[in-house]
């Protein structure tokens, strides 16, 4: 029995260390994603891109944005964990820690971006005009 308990304690310590290691690398991962975005923005700014190039650049931009969103969400979840981790010490409070993390995760999953400047109509026009440009380009 003693060896099983020792193994569980070691596993718990390893998991906590893994969380700390992951947390320590998040800032670098966020910075890396931000640098990639900057590179893509400059690529768009400094080059007149053809339709097929625009498509590939947008695919890469989307990939980087999704990567960045995951890092931001993980930072948010670990922040909740850090502020609540004292609850791990009292077995009666562990449920509250789990609930706080699940609640924050649900908020992140359910969140919908609200445009800061562009209206929904402007976004629709932007997408519509791009479609018209693509059609015109193919016709020429």
Image: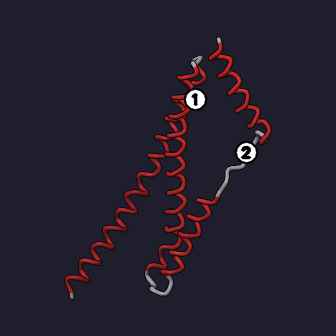
Residue sitting nearer the eye, 110 or 117: 110
What is the residue that sits farthest to the front in this orientation?
A: 139
Q: In this view, does 131 lie above or below 24?
A: above
The residue singled out by tag 2 in the image is 115
Q: Position of residue 47 (x, y in %)?
A: 57, 18
Q: Residue at x 65, y 57 (%)?
A: 111
Q: Where is residue 85 in the image (x, y as percent from the top left)?
A: 48, 73
Q: Which residue is drawn at 39% across and 61% down?
A: 20
Tell me which corner region of the image, top left, top right, bottom left or bottom right, holds residue 88.
bottom left
Number of the label disc, if any, that sits on residue 27: none
Tell me which corner region of the image, top left, top right, bottom left or bottom right, holds residue 123.
top right
Q: Is mark 1 on a helix, strand or loop?
A: helix
Q: Where is residue 1 in the image (x, y as percent from the top left)?
A: 21, 88
Residue sitting nearer the eye, 16 or 110: 110
The residue singled out by tag 1 in the image is 41
Looking at the image, tell me whether mark 1 or mark 2 is earlier in sequence order. Answer: 1
Q: Residue at x 58, y 24 (%)?
A: 44
Q: Which residue is drawn at 19% across and 82% down?
A: 3
């Amino acid at each position: 029995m003693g060896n099983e308990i020792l193994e569980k304690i070691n596993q718990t310590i390893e998991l906590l260390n893994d969380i700390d290691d992951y947390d320590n690398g998040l800032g670098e991962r966020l910075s890396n994603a931000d640098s990639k975005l900057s590179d893509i923005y400059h690529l768009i700014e400094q080059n007149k891109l053809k339709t097929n190039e625009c498509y590939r650049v947008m695919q890469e931009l989307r990939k980087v944005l999704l990567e960045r969103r995951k890092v931001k969400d993980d930072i948010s979840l670990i922040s909740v964990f850090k502020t609540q981790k004292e609850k791990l010490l009292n077995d009666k409070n562990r449920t509250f820690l789990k609930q706080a993390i699940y609640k924050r995760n649900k908020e992140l999953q359910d969140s919908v971006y609200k445009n800061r400047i562009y209206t929904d109509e402007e976004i629709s026009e932007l997408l519509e005009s791009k479609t018209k440009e693509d059609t015109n380009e193919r016709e020429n």
